[in-house]
Amino acid sequence: MDFTLSDEHRLIQSTVRDFAVHEVAPVAEDLDREKRFPYEIVAKLGDLGLMGIPFPQELGGGGGDSLAYAIAVEELTRVDSSVAITLCAHTSLGTQPIYLFGNDEQKAEWMPKLCSGQALGAFGLTEPEAGSDAGNVRTRAGLDGGEWVIDGAKQFITNAGTEISGIVCITARTGPEEISNLIVENGTPGYEQGEPYRKMGWNASDTRPLTFTEARVPEANLLGPRGMGFRQFLQVLDIGRIGVAAMGVGLAQGALDEALAYAKERQAFGQSISKFQAIQMKLADMATEIEAGRLLVYKAARQKDRGEDFSLTAAQAKLKTGRLAVRCAEEAVQIHGGYGYIEEYPVCRFYRDAKILTIGEGTDEVQQMVIARALGA
């Protein structure tokens, strides 16, 4: 197996790394502290073609593959998770349903806007009683005069309430035993975005509840065949796990970067603390585990690009790297000592941002269920 990145993938890696260092890093702390959505950065990501990186150029996308996408997400998360999840949720969850299940008219209307970053996409699955139990959807939609009438609520939805939000693709019960996916455009009467949540981390990303009160959308807003929503969103979630797993690798790598730089600079007992074996062991373990996690993410991406079944690998990657991000962020804070508890140091933000990676896009326990079933247990 060849582990070498192609010239194209290396170019994406260096381009996004340069962007993250020079455009994101200088404002990341301010965005987090002010809980301010990164509009300017999103616009620049759109200009670079990164908001639609894994989609065909004829639809307005960047023409990249899943590996290119994972690399881009990793490099952004290495500096800031809020910016990374904005791109990740938009691409994996908001745009994928249109690309995978949309008809020609839906793609023509929305793909160019979404891929350019002119409009943000969101995915509305989670509800008060439908999270890990994703099939327990209570939001309902019924046909009336050529329109779907939607009633219900969603929670923990990313990207739905910004000034550039365009659509949310929601799951809804369209019959007693069927779930379908529907496109709901921002500005639809009866569709309201609640106030943003006060969160532990990802403070510069947009996360809020949504409500639908007799919200009407055209019958043509149905995504794919009626009643196929459950199968559709499982496919979307599999793809999304590659992106979130890449975030885990990126955050862990960013934590290692900061810990190593600090350990070389910090003096104690007449030498830099990087010379102490206790610190070296932490750094060595972090580096080794990160490389293992990265290869697992890249394997899932390559399997998807080859048209192979990647569900098991994506679940393994997501489980591995979410836990890895939490552990590396904790070790980075420990290496920083008291300074790791101070907001001016990025590792403090990394520590707060890491935990959600073991919860969002399917909890660790859900990943374990997916893996165990794939093993035949």
Image (tube, rainbow, N blue to C red):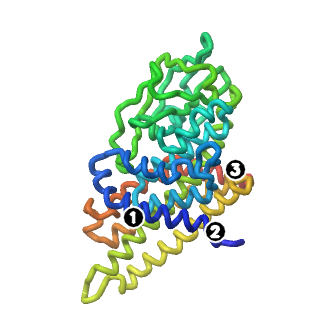
| Picture layout, residue 37 above or below residue 224 | below
SS for dot 3: helix
Residue 290 visible at all: yes
| Circle 1 residue | 21
SS for dot 1: helix
Residue depth check, mark 3 versus mark 1: number of the one nearer the observer: 1
Q: Quadrant of residue 340?
A: bottom left
Contact between marks 2 and 3 (CB within 8 A): the answer is no
Residue 155 % position (x, y): 45, 34
| Circle 2 residue | 6
State the CA–CA distance, disc 3 to disc 1.
41 Å
User: Which residue is painted at 64% across and 55% down in the image?
Assistant: 65
Residue 336 % position (x, y): 31, 71
Horizontal side, residue 83 vs residue 310: left or right:
left
User: Which residue is painted at 35% across and 33% down in the image?
Assistant: 195
Callout 1 amino acid: Val
Callout 2 amino acid: Ser
